[in-house]
Amino acid sequence: MRRLFGSSTQLAAGLVLIGAAGYYLLAVAGRRLDAADASAVGMLYLLANVVGPGIAIPLEQETNRAVSEARARGLAQRTVIRRMCGLGGLLMAAAAVIVGAASPFLVSGPLRDNWGLLLALMVCIATYGTLALVRGVLAGRRQYTGYAVTLVLEGATRLLPLVALDLAGVADATLYGLVFACGGAFAMAGGFLCLKRPAPQDAAEAGAAAPAAGSGEAPSTRTLGAGLTQLLGASLLMQAMANVAPIVVNGRITEQAALAAVVTQAFVLARIPLFLFSPLQSVLLPSLVESVERHDRAGVQRRVRTVLAVIVGIGLAGVVGTAVLGPYILRVFFGAEAELSRTSLAALALGTVGLMAMQVLQPALVAAHRHRWVTWSWAAGASAMAALLFLPGDAVFWAVTAQIAGPVASIAVAGIGLAAYLRDDPAADRGRPVGGAAAQPAGDTIDA
């Protein structure tokens, strides 16, 4: 468990730079741009965090799981990596087509007639998808230092140009958006270089009984595609739950630009803990896959309980911090011209705690090959949220309330699915080799 949180902390340190770049983008937009352009840049940020991670999270997670499983069984990793790259290319192309088809609505609505910001969104799709493949392989091979390198490069190549533009007094929404979107190019280059290094081998793995390297068959493209499709639906629903509420609010209060801007900024502020702990899934999944391959259900349960306890404790502290410091941060650092109550800010942070809990339950279900339960859990949460989000009346009140109801519903369904797996007889895992993780084949590096 110490190694789990140590690795997660290492990755979170890289995410601090990415987070700083994102929040700096919103802050400088609030200072340098008028209310309409600031709102449009905020919408780009939120849309990029719906569409980009919407395809990146399932792609990274399924790549991570497939590589981790190949590693545990002693199978060749190149085969599953090659197949995941093909699936990833199709996924990115499909996302670009969908965004292109929706461009008239996006530009005339959330992006406030700025076609340059639509181009920035398209760039985000390409960089998020490619980085997801690279990071999925790095995490599956437990090359967490290389993973952290990609995070540092992504954050730094966004933050430094944004600071330079701010100091130069630039007031161009399109330029800010494009600089933000292009930050992943250096991260991709760094990731490919890190993949050329051999994967580490834990001492425990070296001494454990393991199947012979190369035994068995790698999963087919069809099998990988089925898992990816289920996770894609789940990821889009999850990203919608995390980010769509301020988009809906902006659409309902178009004549109140200042309030719309502060709602967007408050939602982003409340998501800081969720953002910082997002690498937890990448670190947790390989160890859960190893436990599943050994049919160690008690180990899965113990690990999930421990991580949940820590995550919830940290999240609740974030609720208090958001309620106390939130109004000051929004006013001073984001240049907010309107206010949200401390109760609303605390409720937003509480919803984030629920989403953080799902970051623990989801990789457990994925490791256990319960992909459908992941989709069902996020579908339940999205349905609960939608039931409240579009109710007539105070748009902000219903958006805040929906942020609590959605995660609660998701946790309930995910908990049922995980409990069903834990109750199953280990003998039900037919065709799975029992034993430790395979030793890493010598020289198994990835050619960029």
Image: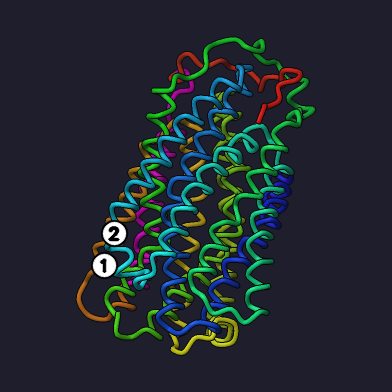
User: Could you tell me which residue is drawn at 46 percent across and 38 percent down?
Assistant: 365
Left or right position of 131 against 106: right
Please, is residue 169 above or below residue 1 in the view?
A: below
Q: Main secondary structure of the magenta part?
A: helix
State how far apart marks 1 and 2 are (Cα): 7 Å
- Numbered mark located on residue 344 in the image: none
Contact, CB < 8 Å: mark 1 with mark 2? yes
Tell me the residue that label 1 is attached to: 388
Image position, residue 235 (x, y; %): 41, 47
Quarter of the image with the N terminus is: top right
54 inside magenta stretch: no
Could you say which is closer to the camera, residue 380 or residue 110? Answer: 110
Left or right position of 323 against 410: right
Residue type beneath disc 2: Ala
User: Could you tell me which residue is drawn at 40 percent across and 45 percent down?
Assistant: 414
The image quarter containing residue 245 is bottom left
Could you say which is closer to the camera, residue 447 or residue 312? Answer: 447
The image quarter containing residue 438 is top right
Judged from the image, the secondary structure of the residue bearing numbered disc 1 is helix
Judged from the image, the secondary structure of the residue bearing numbered disc 2 is helix
Image position, residue 357 (x, y; %): 50, 54
Please, is residue 355 above or below residue 442 in the view?
A: below
User: Could you tell me which residue is drawn at 53 percent across and 80 percent down?
Assistant: 323
Image position, residue 113 (x, y; %): 34, 71
Tell me the residue that label 2 is attached to: 384
409 inside magenta stretch: yes
Q: Residues within 10 Å of mark 2 (few under 14, many from 20)?
A: many
Give the residues drawn in magenta, as a range.
Answer: 399-427
Residue type beneath disc 1: Leu
Left or right position of 398 against 370: left
